Amino acid sequence: MGLDEHDRLIAFVLGLSHALNIAVLHGARGERRSLRRGWRAMSSTTFDAQLDVATRSPGENPDLYYEIQSLNE
């Protein structure tokens, strides 16, 4: 795989992953009261895993996270 193809594919993979995480966090943020009232008890294993990934991702490397979001077309 050439560098251009690698960069195009990794931009897609990282961009989509970050967009999904932002959407999950944005949705969960709007439902904080529901979370406290037992929303998590009603969730699925898939949702729990996605929420776990979404909440950990922003703290991994803020500078890299910013670059992926701001520089990705």
Image (cartoon, grey):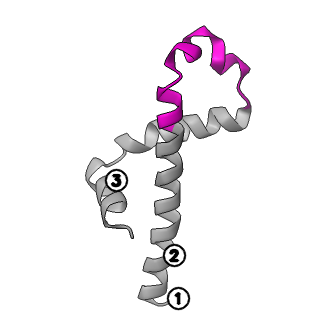
Which dot, 1 or 3, sits closer to the camera?
A: 3
Report the Cα–Cα distance between label 2 and label 1: 10 Å
Q: Amino acid at mark 1?
A: Met
For numbered disc 2, what is the local secondary structure? helix
Residue depicted at 53% across the width and 29% down the height: 28
Numbered tag placed on residue 9 in the rendering: 2
In the image, residue 18 lies at what x, y percent? Answer: 46, 53
- Residue at the image point whose x is 34% and y is 53% from the top: 65
Snapshot quadrant of residue 68: bottom left
Task: Give the Cα separation between the discs numbered 2 and 3.
Answer: 17 Å
The span shown in magenta is 25-44
In the displayed structure image, the side of residue 69 where residue 14 appears, left or right:
right
* The furthest residue to the left: 63
Residue 2 lies, with reference to residue 37, above or below; the image says below
Residue position for label 1:
1
| Residue drawn at (36%, 58%) of the image | 69
In the image, is residue 4 above or below residue 33? below
Q: Earlier in the sequence, mark 1 or mark 3?
A: 1
> Which amino acid type is shown beneath numbered disc 2?
Leu
Mark 1 → mark 3, Cα distance in angstroms: 25 Å
